Image (spheres, rainbow, N blue to C red):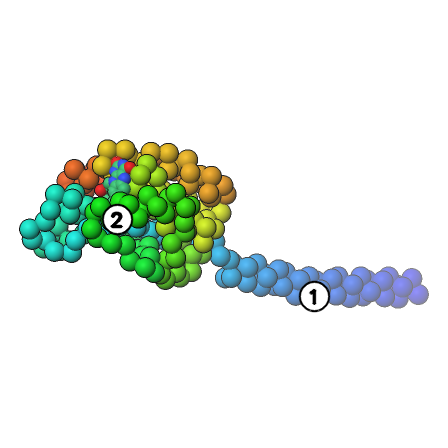
Amino acid sequence: MKRLIVTMLTLTMLFALTACNSNKGPEVSQELTESSKTENISSEPQAAEAKALVVYFSVPETTNPNNMTGEEANSTVIINGEVLGNTQYVANVIQRNTGGDIFRIEPETPYPTDHRTLVELAKDEQNRNFRPVIKGHIDNLDKYDTIFVGYPNWWGDMPMILYSFFDEYDFSGKTIIPFNTHGGSGFSHTINVITELEPNATVNKNGFTVSRNTVQDSETKIISWLKDLGYKK
Ligand SMILES: Cc1cc2nc3c(=O)[nH]c(=O)nc-3n(C[C@H](O)[C@H](O)[C@H](O)COP(=O)(O)O)c2cc1C
């Protein structure tokens, strides 16, 4: 009798243990499934696949490489006969050397290329705190964790279309690296302004700034700046 009771108890324990294990099985695989699902839909790019995005605004004051006025030459760099804006040139060098994507901020209403008219319009936009409408949008900002943002210095500030840009996009959790071209004023206070406009982004204070007088010779400096930041591919 005693032996029978012991045998039954053993069988009951064995059954209970098996039942426990078979319950555990599905729970574990459920956990795995859930976590791999999260990984798949995560909007955070993995380090290996995260790309930089180079965004810039630039107004070359002519598209004709011949017989330029002083003002036109000041706002342009000629590469193989092609006319680029100063900031556009820097943006292209950054893009080539980081392997990132590029997005040009363009206004719905194009800016005049006549220097005087452009200067007056820019001042007027600033006085009115105007927000020019941007043509086109960045596709899938989630793909990028670092955004290089480039602009010319206009009246000691960013062109107002950069304010439209920072109004439109939320760069929380991303790194913004500013770059600019200028006629003597450098960045002015613009890096602080970007920091205020994007309080949840990390704004790199070590931006690249270059005078319009030396921009055409700045490739080596841009590359060494990218190396120092760890973005040279
Ligand atoms: C409307 C306007 C305002 C400018 N204001 C300034 C300024 O306040 N300080 C400065 O250093 N350069 C100023 N510049 C010069 C530009 O910053 C410089 O030419 C720049 O490299 C132009 O870049 P982009 O060819 O990419 O447009 C101004 C140029 C324009 C057209």
The amino acid pointed to by label 2 is Leu
Q: Residue at x 46, y 50 (%)?
A: 167
User: For mark 1, does the 10 Å Cα neighbourhood hold few (<14), some (14 to 19), or many (20 or more) residues?
Assistant: few
On the rendering, which quadrant does ligand 1 occupy?
top left
Whether tag 1 and tag 2 are in contact, CB under 8 A, the answer is: no
Sequence-earlier tag: 1 or 2: 1
The amino acid pointed to by label 1 is Ser
Q: How many marks?
A: 2
Q: Estimate the x, y position of residue 128 in percent, counting from the top left.
A: 41, 46
Q: Estimate the x, y position of residue 212 in percent, counting from the top left.
A: 19, 40
Pointer 2 residue Cβ closer than 8 Å to ligand 1: yes
Give SS at disc 2: helix
Residue 118, numbered label: 2
User: For mark 2, does the 10 Å Cα neighbourhood hold few (<14), some (14 to 19), or many (20 or more) residues?
Assistant: some
| Left-right relation of 26 to 140 | right
| Left-right relation of 216 to 100 | left
Q: Residue at x 20, y 51 (%)?
A: 114
Q: Is residue 175 above or below residue 20?
A: above
What distance separates the C-alpha of mark 1 from that of mark 2? 75 Å
Q: Residue at x 38, y 54 (%)?
A: 132
Q: Residue at x 82, y 65 (%)?
A: 12
| Left-right relation of 76 to 18 | left
Q: Is residue 6 above or below residue 97?
A: below
Residue 188, numbered label: none
Q: Estimate the x, y position of residue 162 in percent, counting from the top left.
A: 37, 48
Q: Residue 110's quadrant in the figure?
A: bottom left
Q: Which residue is mark 1?
A: 22
Give SS at disc 1: helix
Q: Is residue 230 visible?
A: no
Q: Estimate the x, y position of residue 106 in percent, counting from the top left.
A: 31, 57
Q: Nearer the viewer, mark 1 or mark 2?
A: 2
